[in-house]
Image: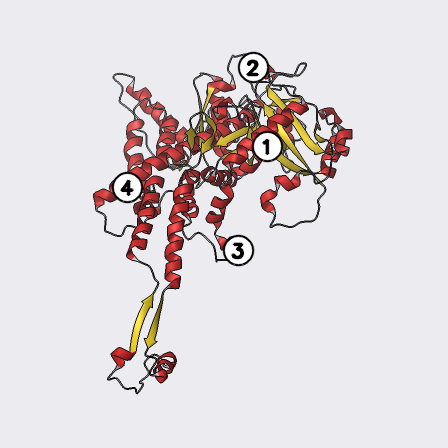
Amino acid sequence: MLNIEPSNLWAEYQAAKRFRDAHLETLNERVRRFTGPAYSGKTFEDFDPESHEYEYISLVLPRVFFDSPRVRVSTIRQGPMQDLALALQAGLNRWIREVRLRNVLTEVGTDMLLSWGMALVTMEPNMSRIVPDSVRATTGYSGTPFRPVVQRISPKRTFWDPMALTYSEARYIGHEWTRDKDDLLMQAQATPEEGWLIDVIAGLSEDAGLGDLRNDMKDREAPSRREVMGVTIYIKGYQIEGQPGPDQGFNGALVEMAMSSSGFVLIRQPRMFYGPASGPYYMFGVYTVPDNSIPLSPTAAMATQVAVLNMHAKAVSQAAARRKRVAFTNDRDPKLADIVANCKDGEVVQINTDELNNNLKEVELGGVTDSALQGLQIERERRDRISGLSDAMRGNVSGDATATENSIASEASGTRMAFIRAQAYEATAQMLRAVAWYLYYDERVVFPVDPQFAQMPGQAIPGQEPWYVGGNPQMGSGATFEDLDLDIEPYSMERTSEQLQQKRLMELTNIIGQVLPAAMQAPINLRELFNLLGNFANVPELSKVVNIPAAEMLQAMMLQGAMQPGMPTQQARLGGDVGMSPMGGSMPAGTASGMQAMQGLTPMGSQGMNDRTM
């Protein structure tokens, strides 16, 4: 078990920081090429003409993190867990929109393409949420509502076990942070039951350690804010004696230290982490390096080739800048030099032209040679070949390449892009699974969800709007959060072109017209069918377009008629006695609609946990 004494954790932190900094040594240079000199007011005298980082990120990032994800939750268990999976799916998709997750994913995605991305999942009070009295009466929870929060942590402020061969094997993970000393002391005094060491916090050194932490921010100025610098370290699998464990939702330990005049000191008693066993930190990386826990980014892999390419590009630019055309005249005719120097374009000048060829010679000096241009082109082709960039991917098809060549280049780029997208989807799914853990177990999570949630079987409470309420109602069934599967819906994070959207719309129109009549006469789950079709077509609202309860009722009527031999099959009509088509209208008279507003989930139980924050 890892030694969590402050002196040992300080040594571990220093080793992890050196390991991290060695892999970030060229990051500032790549960020400088990404932004260009004009971004920060730098001069144009010495800059890299070939901004590979900007070109790569501007092409790849929109293909991976263009929109917020939509998730699909399913379970292998039967019975109430099926309904709970649907409820969790509705709650998670609403949470994604509520917290504007796309903004964080764009930031983390940019980090991923330059080095690696890190996301931190925590629980925080949702002070802006006002819970109606009717919901409080149903849930029995009267405290402040909470919700999961995802934050981006800079690669320069993350660290983990340098001895781990893979990131998943790291025994500890942490990050550096800064905070106003007054705010930290105020929180400690307001909540002493959380284990804060108030006297230690009061003695922390202001602004100590910030110089090293903000070493690359020397071009920014600000007065002293009386901040303190500290670290939070999550230790996997560590159990603190006398504190709750995994059976109560606590997995691993958290240790918080800060800089004082005598070095790093504990500012809070070590405590168990309330959250999933995977911990609060989630890595976004592209390529795995054997026996190294730090992932390899595409721009880091290309840094050497880009440096060589810029050497050639600068040489060509300098040669072009030195190019000049000059005229040499015979020194026996001094007037000729003045005439050549002062005459204007198109001017007619009278001189003796008999010996002009001998007295005047025009010469071109400097300039770009063919060999220099050829060398630059070779380096560009090498860069494109290794990085996977192509004219077809850029959208610059000149016509020089054949259709087959463009198709091969597009397929190769598509394969690389598919892997990067798969890595991003997997990391996003793991992060969202941590969010779903809190929605599943924590009864403090309360928020409204999409009215479509009211259409889910067994979820309706007449006369109330849909609200999601956290907690686990399956305490005695043997069902757990591990029984749930979470997947990101296909194409939900990608951009689709307008032409493709129009094509899919026409295809969907045909599909609905062909599939619906046939499905009405077969034992098919209509809701799952249209959800599946909507996911593949990137139209998640498809199940809203089709009135599923009405379609299911008509389907039941037709199947019932088909199962009774000797009786004519009653054909459902779309008017008169059946006043609703599957595309809208009203239900048959005297039939419960199943569409009433409802009150989200039944409260998901109570764990009785007190300290659940990072």
- The x and y percentages for residue 612 are 64, 25
Quick one: quadrant of the N terminus? top right
Give the mark nearer the N terminus: 3 vs 4.
3
Task: Using the rendered view, name the quadrant where residue 607 is placed.
Answer: top right
How far separated are the C-alphas under marks 3 and 2? 61 Å
Disc 1 designates what residue? 175
The span from disc 3 to disc 4 (Cα, nearest Å) is 37 Å
Please tell me which of labels 1 and 4 falls first in the chain.
1
Residue type at tag 1: His
Label 1: state its secondary structure. strand
Q: Secondary structure at mark 3?
A: loop
Instruction: Determine contact: label 2, label 4, CB under 8 Å.
Output: no
Q: Amino acid at mark 2?
A: Met
**Viewer-nearest residue: 456 or 383:** 383
Q: Earlier in the sequence, mark 2 or mark 4?
A: 4
Amino acid type at image mark 3: Lys
**Label 3–label 2 contact, CB within 8 A:** no
Q: Quadrant of residue 77?
A: top left
Give the CA separation, mark 1 to mark 2.
35 Å
Indicate which label's residue lies in the foreground, 2 or 4.
4
| Pointer 1 or 2: first along the chain | 1
Task: Specify the label residue 42 is tagged with.
Answer: 3
Q: Which residue is mark 2?
A: 475
Q: CA distance from mark 2 to mark 4?
A: 54 Å
Question: Which mark is on residue 409?
Answer: 4
